[in-house]
Every structure is written in structure tokens, then in C-alpha cells.
């Protein structure tokens, strides 16, 4: 079992994945602690606004949990998604986050 995080822009299905727990930083900043099933995610998710997505990912990317993660390259897909998709999205765009 493991913790996997998946995010998708709903209008075009552009997505990114992070495989790993990273001290629960994704659960924390997306306010999705209820999806943490201890050994893995609960296979649930929710829709998030562009503003909420941008704020959560910015906090995650700046977090000590990510800065201290043993594999420094693992966050690259999420960082690229943040920079190339989230920041360039319209304010009305919606995102879906899922915890596996």
C-alpha cells in the first residue's frame, strides 16, 4: 500500500501525480485529511477551485516536507503542473484532487 496524489484540470483532463506520503502534506494543504486511510489514500477526492488549487500547491511546493523529501525529483511533475497549468488557468477553472 502507498499514498498517491492525483490532480486534474477538469476542462481538458490535464493531470499530474505524486507517489508518496511526504508527511501528509497533500492531505493537509488541500484540507482532505478525511481521505487519509493511514496506509494509503481512501480512493476518494473532491473538486477544488483554481484559487484553492493554486494556494494549496504553492504551500506544498514551499513546504519543509517537500524540501526534505528523500527524492528531490519526485515533485517535478507537480511543480510543472502548477507552473504550466494551474497558474495559466482561468479563475473559473475547476480541478479535481484524488487520493489513492
Image (cartoon, grey):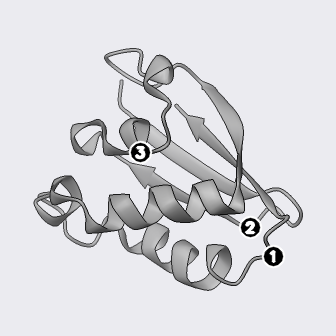
Circle 1 packing at 10 Å, graded few (<14), some (14-19), many (20+), is: few
Q: Residue at x 47, y 67 (%)?
A: 78
Q: Secondary structure at mark 3?
A: helix
- Name the residue that disc number 2 marks: 14
User: Which quarter of the image is occupied by the N terminus?
Assistant: top left
Residue 82 in percent (x, y) is at 54, 73
Q: Earlier in the sequence, mark 2 or mark 1?
A: 2
Kindly identify the residue that appears in the image at 59 percent across and 57 percent down. Answer: 53
Tell me the crowding category of disc 2: few under 14, some 14 to 19, or many 20 or more residues within 10 angstroms, Cα based.
few
Q: Which residue is mark 3?
A: 29
User: In the figure, is residue 7 to the left or right of 47?
Assistant: left
Q: Quadrant of residue 88?
A: bottom right
- Density class for disc 3 (Cα within 10 Å; few <14, some 14-19, many ≥20) is some
Earlier sequence position, callout 3 versus callout 2 = 2
Residue 90 tag number: 1
Is residue 40 found left or right of 89 in the rendered image? left
Q: Nearer the viewer, residue 76 or 60?
A: 60
Furthest toward the right, the residue is 11
Amino acid at each position: 500500500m502507498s499514498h498517491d496524489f492525483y490532480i486534474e484540470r477538469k476542462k481538458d483532463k490535464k493531470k499530474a501525480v505524486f507517489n508518496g506520503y511526504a508527511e501528509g502534506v497533500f492531505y493537509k494543504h488541500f484540507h482532505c485529511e478525511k481521505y487519509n486511510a493511514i496506509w494509503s489514500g481512501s480512493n476518494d477526492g473532491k473538486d477544488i477551485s483554481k484559487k484553492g488549487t493554486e494556494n494549496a500547491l504553492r504551500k506544498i511546493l514551499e513546504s519543509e516536507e517537500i524540501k526534505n523529501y528523500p527524492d528531490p525529483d519526485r515533485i517535478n511533475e507537480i511543480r510543472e503542473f502548477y507552473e504550466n497549468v494551474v497558474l495559466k488557468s482561468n479563475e473559473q477553472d475547476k480541478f479535481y484532487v484524488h487520493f489513492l
